[in-house]
Amino acid sequence: MEPKAKNRIPWQQIGSVAAVAFLGLGMAAAVARGATDAAQQPVSAKKMAERHATVIHVKPDVGTLDTGRRGPQGQVISAPCGSCHKQHSTPPYARKAEDLKEFHAGFRFKHGNIACGACHDLQDRDQLRLADDRRISMSSVIDLCSQCHGPQARDYAHGAHGGMNGYWDLRRGDRVRNVCVDCHNPHVPAYPQFAPVQRPRDRFLEAEAAAGGHHE
């Protein structure tokens, strides 16, 4: 009968210790990998909104009349439409540009077959009127235009219509978007056609002309 060896570690115990060690290393690696993946994943829209925002730019003079005067810093001094219209707000109201005989005479309008009251609140000229008869401020003009110009409103919502500045990635900074009247005259919204200011240069034709040649 062989004597028992002192301090001998059973193989089962060695295997258990190794298994626990590998398990611990695996968990640590998983935690580290998870932290890296989380850092690389895009921030949710909610988190983006908490950090940066999309700002809708509205011109400060929208819905006002330029008085022709300038402030100390050169800023435009404008007057709200209601400052005059409240004194001339009795019916009958002008419906078309051709009806304007005293104020805004010669006003140009080319925006479909609609009357002034289709967009303007005739009782309060500092507000706009939606098709469901709700009143909105001049700064909310995009809500008014979207009623009829659906495709443009859809493209605007996806960033394909209307200019913007700032960042596409809101994690990096704010985004500033224009409204309809930043680019379009609301009363004559179509861009006018015009000829190029200067025709493209053709250096070969210019060289022939300088040499007295003729080009068919």
Image: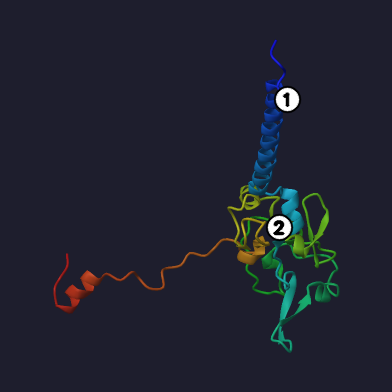
Residue 6 is tagged as 1
Badge 1 element: loop
Q: Residue at x 17, y 67 (%)?
A: 215
Badge 2 element: helix
Q: Say which quarter of the image contains residue 109.
A: bottom right
Colouring chosen for the image of the structure: rainbow
Other residues around mark 1 within 10 Å, as few (<14) / some (14–19) / many (≥20): few
Q: Indicate the quadrant containing the N terminus: top left, top right, bottom left or bottom right.
A: top right
Q: Residue 8, how many percent across, how many down?
A: 70, 25
Q: Of tags 1 and 2, which is closer to the observer?
A: 1
Q: Is residue 140 above or below residue 208?
A: above
Q: Residue 197, how many percent across, how many down?
A: 41, 73
Q: Residue 126, how many percent across, how many down?
A: 81, 67
The residue sitting at the bottom extreme is: 72
- The answer to whether residue 52 is visible is yes
Q: Residue at x 72, y 53 (%)?
A: 48
Q: Residue at x 63, y 48 (%)?
A: 40
Q: Residue at x 60, y 58 (%)?
A: 162
Q: Amino acid at mark 1?
A: Lys
